[in-house]
C-alpha cells in the first residue's frame, strides 16, 4: 500500500545502467548463511568454505554493479547473515578501497552489538545470537564521495491521463493529497510527482513489476478498489467500514463466509480493531470477499 514504492525484478547489471540515480542503496547480499545456524539446522548442511568463497565473489559482483547507480554523496548499506570475514570485513575493506568513506555508527552499548574495523575507516557491526535477541548478522555503512546533485527530469514523455469523471470518483474515495494519478492496464495508480518523473528512466533499464499505489479501476463510474488501497491508510472516512470480531476477521482472511452480518448493498472496508483488512462487496443477500486468494490463511485454528 505504499505510493512511493517501485518494485522491480532485475539483475544487478541492469542497475548499473542508471548512473548516479539513487540517494541510498541497501544491499542485503546473498550469503553462506552461517548466521542462521541456530535458527535453521539445514543451513549447517549447506555451508562450506567453497560456498563462502562463491558468495564473496557474488557479493562483490553485486556491489560493482550497484555502485554506479549511487549518487555522489549517497549512502550504501551492506549486510549479510554470515560470520565469515570473506563476506563481511573483507567486503567492507574493499568498499573503502573503491573510494567510499566508512560510517561509524553510534550504538547503545546495552545492545551488545560488536564494532569491528576491517581496515582504517572500514567499520562493520556484528550481531551475535548469544549477545542479543536475534540471529547472526553483519552490517556496514558507507558514504560515496562527492556532492549530491538533482537529476534532471525534463522532457519526459507521460502516458495518456485519466478522464475527469474517473478522477472525480477516485478523489471521492481516496485522500490523494499532492500525488498524481497514472493509468496502467486500466488501473489507476497514485504516486508522488518525484516517482512519476523518474518512471521513464527506470523503465528504460529495469523490469518493473509495480509502481506507486494501486487504487483499483473505475468501471462504468463505479470504483473496483484494489487490496493495496485498503491497507494504504489513504481511504477517506466517508467510505463505509465494517468492523468485525476476531472470529469473523479470521474467517475473512480465509475467504470464508462472514457470519451474522447484514449490510446494505455496496462496498465496505473490513476492519478489525479499526485496522483495515480488505474489501467486501455486499449484494444485499450475500457478500463477495475481495481478499487476495493467494494470501488467504490456509491453516485452521
Image: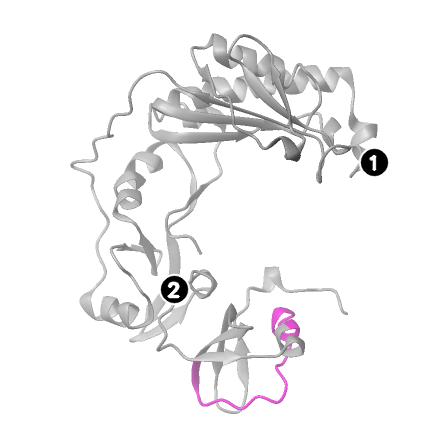
Q: Quadrant of the N terminus?
A: bottom left
Query: Which SS type dominates the magenta stretch?
Result: loop
Q: Is residue 260 magenta?
A: yes
| Closer-to-camera residue (264/141) | 141
Which quadrant of the figure has residue 28?
A: top right
**Which residue, given by chain and number where applicable, does mark 2 sit on?**
216
User: Is 44 or 23 nearer to us in this picture?
Assistant: 23
> Which image quarter holds the C terminus?
bottom right
Looking at the image, is mark 1 or mark 2 nearer the viewer?
1
- Which residue lies most toward the left here? 155
Assess whether mark 2 and mark 1 are in contact (beta carbons under 8 angstroms).
no
Query: What residue appears at the point 38 percent right and 77 percent down from the top-left corner?
Result: 239
How far from the left and from the top, in percent, is residue 33? 72, 29
Q: Position of residue 164 (x, y in %)?
A: 19, 67
114 magenta-colored: no
Task: Give the alpha-carbon distance from disc 1 to disc 2, as whole Å.
Answer: 43 Å
Q: On the rendered structure, is 156 left or right of 17?
A: left
Q: Residue at x 71, y 22 (%)?
A: 83
Q: Which residue is mark 1?
A: 41
Q: Is residue 263 left or right of residue 89?
A: left
* Neighbour tally class for label 2: few under 14, some 14-19, many 20 plus, Cα within 10 Å: some
Q: Earlier in the sequence, mark 1 or mark 2?
A: 1
- Residue 247, picture quadrant: bottom right
Which portion, as a residue range, is magenta?
A: 250-267
Amino acid at each position: 500500500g505504499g505510493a512511493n514504492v517501485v518494485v522491480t525484478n532485475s539483475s544487478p547489471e541492469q542497475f548499473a545502467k542508471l548512473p548516479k540515480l539513487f540517494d541510498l542503496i541497501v544491499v542485503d547480499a546473498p550469503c553462506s548463511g552461517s548466521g542462521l545456524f541456530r535458527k535453521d539446522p539445514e543451513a549447517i548442511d549447506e555451508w562450506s568454505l567453497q560456498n563462502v568463497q562463491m558468495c564473496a565473489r557474488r557479493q562483490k559482483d553485486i556491489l560493482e554493479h550497484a555502485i554506479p547507480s549511487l549518487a555522489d554523496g549517497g549512502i550504501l548499506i551492506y549486510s549479510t547473515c554470515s560470520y565469515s570475514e570473506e563476506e563481511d570485513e573483507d567486503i567492507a575493506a574493499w568498499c573503502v578501497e573503491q573510494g567510499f568513506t566508512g560510517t561509524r555508527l553510534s550504538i547503545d552499548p546495552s545492545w551488545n552489538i560488536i564494532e569491528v574495523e576491517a581496515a582504517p575507516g572500514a567499520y562493520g557491526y556484528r550481531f551475535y545470537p548469544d549477545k542479543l535477541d536475534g540471529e547472526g548478522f553483519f552490517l556496514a555503512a558507507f558514504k560515496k564521495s562527492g556532492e549530491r546533485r538533482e537529476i534532471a527530469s525534463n522532457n519526459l514523455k507521460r502516458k495518456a491521463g485519466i478522464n475527469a469523471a474517473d478522477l472525480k470518483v477516485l478523489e471521492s474515495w481516496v485522500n490523494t493529497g499532492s500525488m498524481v494519478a497514472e493509468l496502467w492496464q486500466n488501473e489507476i495508480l497514485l504516486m508522488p510527482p518525484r516517482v512519476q518523473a523518474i518512471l521513464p528512466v527506470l523503465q528504460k533499464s529495469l523490469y518493473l513489476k509495480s509502481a506507486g499505489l494501486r487504487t483499483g479501476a473505475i468501471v462504468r463510474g463505479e470504483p473496483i478498489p484494489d487490496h493495496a488501497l485498503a491497507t494504504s491508510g489513504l481511504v477517506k472516512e466517508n467510505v463505509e467500514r465494517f468492523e468485525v470480531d476476531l472470529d469473523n476477521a479470521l474467517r475473512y482472511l480465509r475467504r470464508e463466509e462472514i457470519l451474522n452480518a447484514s449490510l446494505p448493498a455496496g462496498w465496505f472496508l473490513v476492519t478489525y480493531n479499526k485496522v483495515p483488512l480488505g474489501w467486501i462487496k455486499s449484494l444485499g443477500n450475500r457478500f463477495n470477499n475481495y481478499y487476495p486468494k493467494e494470501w488467504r490463511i490456509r491453516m485452521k485454528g
